[in-house]
Image: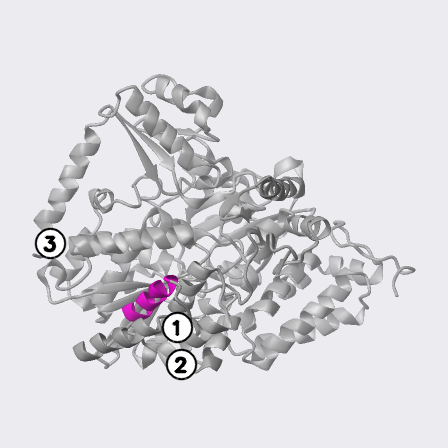
Amino acid sequence: MTLTLEDLQGISKIEQDRQEGFHHHINVCIAAGCLSCQSGLVKEALEKEVARRGLENWCRVKGVGCLGLCAAGPLISIEPEGTYYQGVTVADVSDILDALGGSPVSRLDCSAELPFFQRQQKIVLENCGKIEPERIEDYIAEGGYEPLYNALRLMTPGEVIEDVVASGLRGRGGAGFPTGLKWTTVSKAANGTKFVICNADEGDPGAFMDRSVLESDPHRVIEGMAIAGYAVGASRGFIYVRAEYPLAVKRLRTAIAQAERLGVLGHNIFNTTFSFVIEVRLGAGAFVCGEETALIASIEGRLGRPRPRPPYPAEMGLWGYPTLINNVETFANIPPIVRNGGKWLAGIGTEKSKGTKVFALAGRVNHTGLIEVAMGTMLRDIVFDIGGGIPDGKKFKAVQTGGPSGGCVPAQHLNMPVDYESLAEVGSIMGSGGLIVMDEASCMVDVAKFFMEFCMSESCGKCVPCRVGTTQIHDVLCKITNGSGKDSDIALLEELCDLVKNTALCGLGQTAPNPVMSTLRYFRDEYTAHVRDNVCLSGACKIHTPTEAP
Amino acid sequence: MEKKAVQPPNQRAEKTGPSEDRRWRLVDRTMRLHGNKSHALIETLHTVQEHFGFLDLDALKYVAEQLRVPLSRVYAVATFYQHFTLKPPGKHTCVVCKGTACYIGGASNILNEIEGKVGIAPNETTSDGEISLVTARCLGSCGLAPAVVMDGEVCGRMTPPAVMERIEKWRSHDTDA
């Protein structure tokens, strides 16, 4: 029995009717951030109290994905009023139910008028915090899997690709390669067997966008992959996800099983000749596996070591077959593109960077959490409006973007639009979307050392420039931060960075010097203070005084 | 295909795994689901570690034999990936996140405190086999930095004293019991 459009609309109608039957919806965030603040207990307590009061048909308690403002967890949103409650505990449950239909509980109120909620533009995260991630019906009620139907039944693969090309979507994993071009290349590859891989090996420290999307809206990614499979002619897909994200893995597996049972994955989807299955593969804690050729090696059960490109995976990928690899967020952009047309997405963002970008805002900023803004939003707006500024009245120092492959953007560039080109111009990268805010208490040499230590221990060891170079750079940085650095060390750093950048085999090595180079560019005075005067301006480094030094 | 599928289970029934332990059946199941192909290696090692806590030489040899992969490659994979461990973990595990946000938030102070007071460095276990200290690259709980996972429970906004309090609790519970 195959699923038809009527079946899909029927499921959607039943679910919508069911939802309309309730006067109030209490949405409790059960993504990893809030769960670790005991939101699971809050949800249980709410359910019990609703049952005790006999309100089951009047209000519905629902566990939803990330509501965004992780700093204020556990978060609850009340629909249709649009009230947000923050820092909810089990003790607040009665008060929340008492206040339904009346004025909100003022001590828990988290104003929905905050720029944090108002300044965002949600496409990828449109269902996050709205739907129950473990119920496919909820996703279908929001129009889910209709884009897949439309693609399979009303469009040719070529038309789907045309839409993606027209949208101007660029890879959200970091490098920003045009997605349409990648799809075209894979679709043109002659081989009969092809694969689609979703890169969910989100290794950048400070980034949790992919985890939130997978935990909050797993069906969106599955649907995006199925559409991609149809467009490029692949019938098997893999999601390579970090073992460190057990909740995301669990929800993904549940979602795949539901999709298979319903028939939106499997054989002859929507009564067409198109078949598509998805397998989950676990990473095992190797950062380098985020690099596409290393990721492929890891799926094949080998050491996650990159190989030189070309041939690119689009021509020769998994087991030698043409393979399409895209990031979680890229796939999550696909269903809305098919639904609204490529031109719609092209109308959002800047000239060369289209659409929106999800960022994980963390570090020394008041509103840490998950945000989605249109490309081209000013960095100042992200840090000070949406992020709510720096806590404890401290001074802003820099924003680190792009993780260990990125750089630090100092205060003088705060009035810069956030898009691929502008970030590259100031010596950083878009990266996968981690934004770490640093205040005056952070020593930039120490930050550079932190990232270099990361790259050094995550280097796979295959090529010499990366294996030896990162260790050398780290040694010099250690010397500088403990006060035994010399003037010549800064020149040595620059030489080493240049060497590693230009000679390393893969993206990890080529971008590893970025944090050092960008801090040298904007915070050179801190380096010189360390080597000349033996002082750390922010007091983060424990420097020996010259007499103590051996 | 059919015939092949029938025969090996009989052979294996005699020597399921390196020991009589029933958990080996779960390991066998993972390998079977992937057609006993070499690409099942990482998934299989995940299963072994999930059920046994670590990978010992017997396990590596068994997996190598079953998947027809050289033992050297199995060992290489088991040591390349940070997630796999060849040493048995302590009874309690404390994972300190060393992601950027946690680093900025003071994760190194927590590590220093544990090193100083419990006397173990990252990837070490106390001599009584009670407590293991591990570091993670990034747990993705950056909104709650610094984050520490105490026996599988993610705790946000931790301070050195708060972590020590939890560790002391483990100790006192165990001596009570």
Q: Decide: few, some or many residues near mark 1? Use Cα within 10 Å; few <14, some 14-19, many ≥20.
A: many
Circles 2 and 1, Cβ within 8 Å, touching? The answer is yes
Residues A292 and B49: in front is: B49
Which chain does tag 1 point to? B
Position of the C terminus of chain A, as image quadrant, is bottom right
Label 1 sits on a secondary structure element that is helix
CA gap, disc 1 and disc 3: 36 Å
Between marks 1 and 3 in the image, the one whose residue lies nearer the viewer: 1
Q: Residue at x 40, y 63 (%)?
A: B21
Considering only vertical position in the picture, is A478 above or below A333?
below
Q: Do labels 2 and 1 share a chain?
A: yes
Is A319 one of the magenta-colored residues? no
Q: Which residue is drawn at 35% across and 21% down?
A: A97
Residue type marked 1? Leu
* Quarter-of-image position of residue A452: bottom right
What is the x, y in percent for residue A143?
Answer: 21, 46
Residues A135 and A185: in front is: A135
Residues A464 and B22: in front is: B22
- Disc 2 target residue: B69
Magenta residues, as a range?
B22-33
Question: Which mark, by number, is residue B41?
Answer: 1
Is residue A303 visible to the viewer in this orientation of the structure? no
CA gap, disc 2 and disc 1: 8 Å
Between marks 3 and 2 in the image, the one whose residue lies nearer the viewer: 2
Q: Do labels 1 and 3 share a chain?
A: no
Q: Which of marks 2 and 1 is nearer the N terminus?
A: 1
- Disc 3 target residue: A3
What is the x, y in percent for residue A106?
Answer: 46, 20
Residue type marked 3? Leu
Position of the N terminus of chain A, as image quadrant, is bottom left
